[in-house]
């Protein structure tokens, strides 16, 4: 079986001052020491990216932005391009987070444009999907996830090729910031569905290599049971990534 390297990613959302962000990443860097069996990613706000990059060892901690525009440059007041993210030291970019989808009306078609631009530039997209509580309760979870995957990754489908470096994240909307974690069984059921979708849409080799992270109230005390599931390859963490103690603990305790 293909061994996928686990990943623990911190999505800092719209939190932390510049000084706090630099102090946090320095504390994470020293806290994790020479950890080598897990990839660590942090996603600060745009304004903190360059300073955070300057404060970390790029071989130990990868840097992501939380969003980007799909055009390379131009008259798009207030937007940030993928190339600008690369100039700030980013290797990854989170795309289609549920907060962007629900609060900023970002559709899967827009996510697809962003995924295409990121891939063109060589930025690794972390593409998020997830159902709302309403959708889960009306038993539409798989239908919603399939539609989000079909549309958000439409360009890869057209090419009949998805780069194996692509990272997917399953974040049930009802579990984000609520303290309600999906049970390992609930999460695995959807992760497995996503892996089968990759296999059916592309091929089994791609399905075996693409990492699928779980997000939604991941904490040091539940990360291990979640990651013990065969199709859960890591965590995309909000709240618990904002304190070095809990984030370092997550990284250290992820092993099954
Ligand atoms: P919480 O870990 O705070 O639930 O946030 C999850 C998330 O949205 C990560 O992208």
Image: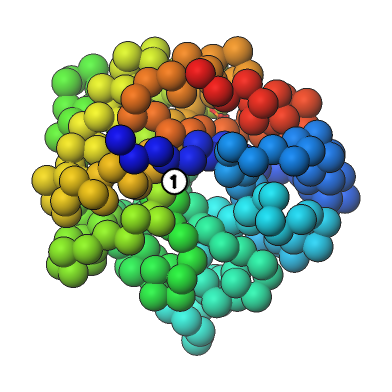
Q: Quarter for ligand 1?
A: top right
* Residue 231 in the image, given as x and y percentages of width and height: 33, 29
Query: Who is closer to the viewer here, 1 or 31?
Result: 1
Label 1 CB less than 8 angstroms from ligand 1: yes
Residue at 75% in and 65% down: 50
Extreme front residue here?
1
Task: Name the one closer to the observer, 165 or 69.
Answer: 165
x, y percentage for residue 103? 45, 45
Which quarter of the image is occupied by the N terminus?
top left
On screen, residue 54 above or below 146: below
Q: Would residue 180 be seen by someone viewing this image from the given angle?
A: no
Label 1: which secondary element: loop
Camera-side residue of 50 and 101? 50
Residue 169 falls in image quadrant: top left
Task: Estimate the x, y position of residue 134 in percent, counting from the top left.
Answer: 27, 23
Residue, disc 1:
97
One can see residue 195 in this view: yes
Relative to 146, 9 lies left or right: right
* Front in this rendered view, residue 63 or 205: 205
Query: Residue at (60%, 13%) from the top-left corner?
Result: 221
Where residue 156 sits, quadrant-wise, is bottom left
């Amino acid at each position: 079986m293909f061994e996928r390297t686990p990943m623990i990613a911190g999505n800092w959302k719209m939190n932390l001052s510049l000084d706090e962000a630099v102090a946090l990443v320095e504390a994470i860097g020293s806290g994790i020491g020479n950890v080598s069996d897990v990839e660590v990613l942090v996603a600060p706000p745009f304004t903190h990216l360059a300073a955070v990059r300057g404060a970390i060892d790029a071989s130990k901690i990868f840097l992501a932005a939380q969003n980007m525009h799909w055009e390379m440059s131009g008259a798009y007041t207030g937007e940030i391009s993928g190339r600008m993210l690369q100039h700030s030291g980013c290797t990854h970019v989170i795309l289609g987070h549920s907060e962007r989808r629900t609060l900023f009306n970002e559709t899967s078609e827009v996510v697809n444009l962003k995924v295409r631009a990121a891939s063109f530039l060589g930025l690794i997209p972390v593409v998020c999907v997830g159902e709302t509580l309403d959708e889960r309760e009306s038993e539409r979870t798989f239908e919603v996830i399939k539609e989000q995957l079909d549309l958000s990754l439409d360009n890869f489908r057209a090419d009949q090729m998805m780069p194996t470096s692509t990272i997917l994240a399953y974040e049930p909307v009802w579990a984000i910031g609520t303290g309600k974690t999906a049970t390992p069984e609930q999460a695995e059921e959807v992760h497995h569905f996503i892996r089968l979708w990759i296999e059916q849409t592309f091929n089994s080799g791609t399905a075996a290599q693409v990492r699928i992270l779980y997000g939604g109230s991941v904490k040091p005390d539940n990360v291990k049971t979640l990651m013990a599931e065969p199709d859960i390859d890591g965590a995309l963490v909000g709240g618990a990534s904002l304190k070095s103690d809990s984030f370092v603990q997550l990284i250290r305790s992820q092993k099954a």
